[in-house]
C-alpha cells in the first residue's frame, strides 16, 4: 500500500480511502455489467438505480422534507450563483445578500447581472474574519430571498446558526460544509453545494429546492438553467456527470456507515480542536484569522508573524507529506481544510508538526 498524503486541500479535496478502494474494485466492471459505470447509458436501469440511491441517501442523511426536490446538476456552485437569481429573482424584487467574503462576493456579482441586489449585512470592516450578527436583520420589503454563504472556505468562517427569514426564502451556498453537521433544511428555500469538498469528486452539484420555488422557474431563461427542467426529469434531462454521481453515492453510503451526520459532526469538532488548540496555545506564534465565535470546522485559517516563516512552514510541511496548507492567494497565510473525509490521524500529525515547527523557529 502506497503511503497516503496528509491531504488538507481546499477542493478538490480528500476522499475516504474506503470509497476510493471500492471505486477501484468496480472501475472496470460495475455490478457484473461488463463495463465501467462511466461507459454506461444514463438511461440504463443500473445507472438509474445509482441516481435514485444518491438522492434518497441525501434525503435520509440530511433530513430533507418531502416537499423538496434533490437535483444532481453540473456547473458547480459558480453556475448556481447565476441560476438562483435567474430562477428566483423576479421583476420588481430585490435579491438580499449577506457579504461574508470571497464566495459571497462572487454570488453577489452574478446576481447583479439579473436584477436588483442589496447587501443587508457585511463583515467587511473586519476583513471578513467573522460572520455578521443577523439577529436583527432588516430585509427589503420586496426581497425575493436572502442568500448566505454558510462557510467561507478562504477566510475560514462559518455560520453557527441561521437567521429566521419568515416568508422570505433563505438560500444557502453550502459547498464547503454540507453534511458536516445536522441542519434544519425546512428553514431554507434552497441549498446548493459543489460536491468536491465534502461529498465526492468535482463534477456534480447538489441543489435542494422547495417545490414551490422550483415550480416558478421563468420560462424565459435557458432550459438547462431552469430548476423545473431538472425536477421534471429527475436530474436526467441531459447526460449527467454519471461517474461523479456514482462517487458521491459511495461517499453518502460511507457517511451513513460512520453513524450519519451527527456522528460526523462530533468527529469534525474533535479533529479541528486539535489544530485550534495548537494555535491558541502557541503564545502568539500562530495566530488564527477567524474570530473564535465564527471559526469554521471545515477550514482552519491562520498566520505566523512573518511571511518568510509561512513560506518555510509550507516548504517543510510538504517535505513531511502534508499537502494544501498554503492559504488562498487572495488572503495569504496558511489554511488546513478538514472536510469529513480528512482522517483524525492527519489532524494529529498536523498538530504535532505545528508544535515541532514552533520549537525549531519560535
Image (cartoon, helix red, strand yellow):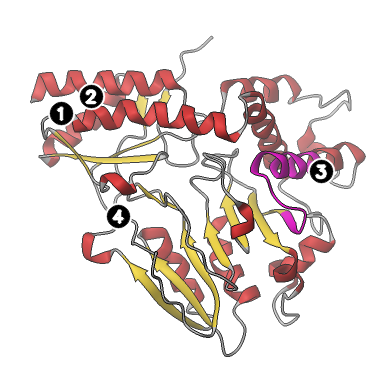
Residue 52, numbered label: 3
Magenta span includes 53 = yes
Q: Residue furthest left?
A: 362
Asked whether 346 or 35 is in front, the reply is 346
Distance between the Cα atoms at labels 3 and 4?
38 Å
In this picture, residue 103 sits left or right of residue 227:
left
Q: Earlier in the sequence, mark 4 or mark 2?
A: 4
Residue 130, numbered label: 4
Dividing the picture into quarters, in which one does residue 119 lie? bottom left
Query: Magenta segment, which residues?
Result: 51-70
Q: Nearer the viewer, mark 2 or mark 1?
A: 1
Q: Nearer the viewer, mark 3 or mark 1?
A: 1
Distance between the Cα atoms at labels 3 and 1?
49 Å
Q: Residues within 10 Å of mark 3 (few under 14, many from 20)?
A: some
The answer to whether residue 321 is visible is: no
Q: Earlier in the sequence, mark 3 or mark 4?
A: 3
Name the residue that disc number 1 marks.
282
Residue in the image at 49% along x and 36% along y? 13
Q: Quadrant of the N terminus?
A: top right
Q: Earlier in the sequence, mark 2 or mark 1?
A: 1
Residue in the image at 59% along x and 51% along y? 184
Amino acid at each position: 500500500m502506497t503511503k497516503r498524503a496528509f491531504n488538507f486541500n481546499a477542493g478538490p479535496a480528500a476522499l475516504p480511502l474506503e470509497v476510493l478502494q471500492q471505486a477501484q474494485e468496480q472501475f472496470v466492471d460495475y455490478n457484473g455489467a461488463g463495463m465501467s459505470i462511466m461507459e454506461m447509458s444514463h438511461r440504463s436501469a443500473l445507472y438509474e438505480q445509482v441516481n435514485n440511491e444518491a438522492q434518497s441517501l441525501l434525503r435520509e442523511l440530511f433530513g430533507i422534507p418531502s416537499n423538496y426536490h434533490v437535483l444532481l446538476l453540473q456547473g458547480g456552485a459558480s453556475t448556481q450563483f447565476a441560476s438562483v437569481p435567474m430562477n428566483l429573482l423576479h421583476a420588481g424584487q430585490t435579491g438580499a445578500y449577506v457579504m461574508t467574503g470571497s464566495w459571497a462576493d462572487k454570488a453577489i456579482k452574478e446576481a447583479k447581472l439579473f436584477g436588483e441586489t442589496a447587501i443587508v449585512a457585511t463583515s467587511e470592516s473586519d476583513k471578513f474574519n467573522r460572520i455578521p450578527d443577523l439577529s436583527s436583520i432588516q430585509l427589503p420589503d420586496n426581497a425575493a430571498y436572502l442568500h448566505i454563504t454558510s462557510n467561507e472556505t478562504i477566510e475560514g468562517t462559518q455560520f453557527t446558526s441561521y437567521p429566521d427569514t419568515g416568508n422570505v426564502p433563505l438560500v444557502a451556498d453550502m459547498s464547503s460544509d454540507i453534511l458536516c453537521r445536522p441542519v434544519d433544511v425546512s428553514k431554507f428555500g434552497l441549498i446548493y453545494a459543489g460536491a468536491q469538498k465534502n461529498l465526492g469528486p468535482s463534477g456534480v452539484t447538489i441543489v435542494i429546492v422547495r417545490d414551490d420555488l422550483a415550480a416558478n422557474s421563468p420560462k424565459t431563461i435557458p432550459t438547462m438553467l431552469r430548476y423545473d427542467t431538472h425536477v421534471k426529469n429527475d436530474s436526467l434531462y441531459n447526460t449527467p456527470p454519471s461517474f461523479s454521481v456514482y462517487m458521491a453515492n459511495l461517499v453518502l453510503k460511507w457517511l451513513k456507515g460512520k453513524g450519519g451526520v451527527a456522528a460526523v459532526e462530533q468527529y469534525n469538532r474533535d479533529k479541528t480542536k486539535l489544530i485550534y488548540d495548537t494555535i491558541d496555545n502557541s503564545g502568539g506564534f500562530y495566530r488564527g484569522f477567524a474570530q473564535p465565535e465564527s471559526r469554521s470546522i471545515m477550514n482552519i485559517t491562520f498566520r505566523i508573524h512573518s511571511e518568510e516563516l509561512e513560506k518555510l512552514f509550507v516548504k517543510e510541511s510538504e517535505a513531511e507529506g502534508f499537502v494544501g496548507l498554503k492559504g488562498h492567494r487572495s488572503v495569504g497565510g496558511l489554511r488546513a481544510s478538514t472536510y469529513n473525509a480528512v482522517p483524525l490521524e492527519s489532524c494529529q500529525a498536523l498538530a504535532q508538526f505545528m508544535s515541532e515547527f514552533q520549537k525549531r523557529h519560535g
